[in-house]
Image (cartoon, rainbow, N blue to C red):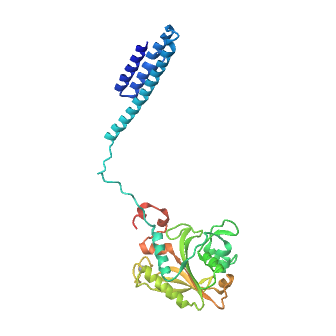
Amino acid sequence: MREQLMKIRQDASSALAKADSVAAIEDIRIQFLGKKGDLTAVLRGMGGLSAEERPLIGQLANEVRAFIEEEIEKANEILKAKEGLARLATEGLDVTMPGKPNVIGHKHPLTMVLDEMKSIFIGMGYEIAEGPEVELDYYNFEALNMPKHHPARDTQDTFYIDETVILRTQTSSVQIRTMENQQPPIKIICPGRIYRSDEIDATHSPIFHQLEGLVVDKGVTMGDLIGTLKLFVKNIFGENTNIRLRPHHFPYTEPSAEVDVTCWVCGGAGCRVCKQEGWIEILGCGMVHPKVLENCGIDSEIYSGFAFGIGVDRTAMGRFGIDDIRLLFENDIRFLNQF
Ligand SMILES: [Zn+2]
């Protein structure tokens, strides 16, 4: 019986050495260790053994079983390693092949123009101020000299969250928030997204962008405002660009003006883009209304200031020759890749 067991041990070992698949190894396990396997068959004959021999043979049988189980495990591991090597050989990495280039995006045309505008004003000593897009009616209208039912509100109809909370129609709300918290001298720009309940067409969008500027100090005059705007347009549209002021009315500035710049397409000669005028309107401005200063706790007898609001979208459209504002918001990659 001892010899039988040793032979099983030997046979299983050499069979496993030749096994070349998971299935083959499983067959060997069944052949030697299964219920009808060789080892079980030997153990069945143990009844005929003497009482002294039985435990000894029993122990040997257990050892043989443990040995075969261990050999099966090893064979499986070797097989796995071999399969791994084979896969490496067939699916090998060719390090000389050219790589796939990473597609890196770039700034949106609006962001490009806005960054340029910001850097021009930062160069003139302005600081950037920011505020909420979801704004209180007070900061967007009332503090800017537009009480409830003021007709000027009609031209700035917006989206109402409730009676007192709205989506801001201009970044002037940030000017109010700044003046409330800071005494002059104040010299800020407020860039940001604004909202109006306009129908979407080639020149209108319910969302657009504005950059407003505010300067409040002793002795600030309209001359300072005009000088600032001239410097700005020459920087952004070119040295030969000039400005033209047309009297206008805003509730928050007095006097107020709308500002045109020399047409960036024809240089002032007249063309389709400027409707033969030679000028294109890009911003509104004026001297801060004394009442607005007083609303913010600034003494209008001592201080004066000017403010202006520039359309970022319109500036970007002029800068890049874009004829439809919707292109700026559709985020069509074929369009954006042109910049
Ligand atoms: Zn023109």
Where residue 17 sits, quadrant-wise, is: top left
- Name of the residue lying farthest toward the top: 48
- On screen, residue 41 above or below 159: above
Q: Is residue 231 left or right of residue 247?
A: left
Give the residue drawn at x 45%, y 16%.
39
Task: Point out the image quarter for the N terminus.
Answer: top left
Give the residue drawn at x 59%, y 88%.
217
Q: Depth check: give the residue in front, 221 or 285.
A: 221
Task: Point out the image quarter for the C terminus.
Answer: bottom left
Residue 250 in picture, x, y percent from top left: 61, 82
Residue 247 in picture, x, y percent from top left: 56, 87
Q: Depth check: give the residue in front, 224 or 84.
A: 84
Q: Is residue 319 visible?
A: yes
Image mark count: 0
- Which quarter is ligand 1 in? bottom left
- On screen, residue 140 above or below 289: above
Residue 336 in picture, x, y percent from top left: 43, 64
Q: Is residue 277 visible?
A: no
- Name of the residue lying farthest toward the front: 52
Q: Depth check: give the residue in front, 30 or 105.
A: 30
- On screen, residue 332 above or below 282: above
Residue 86 in picture, x, y percent from top left: 33, 37
Where residue 37 sits, quadrant-wise, is: top left
Where residue 195 sits, quadrant-wise, is: bottom right
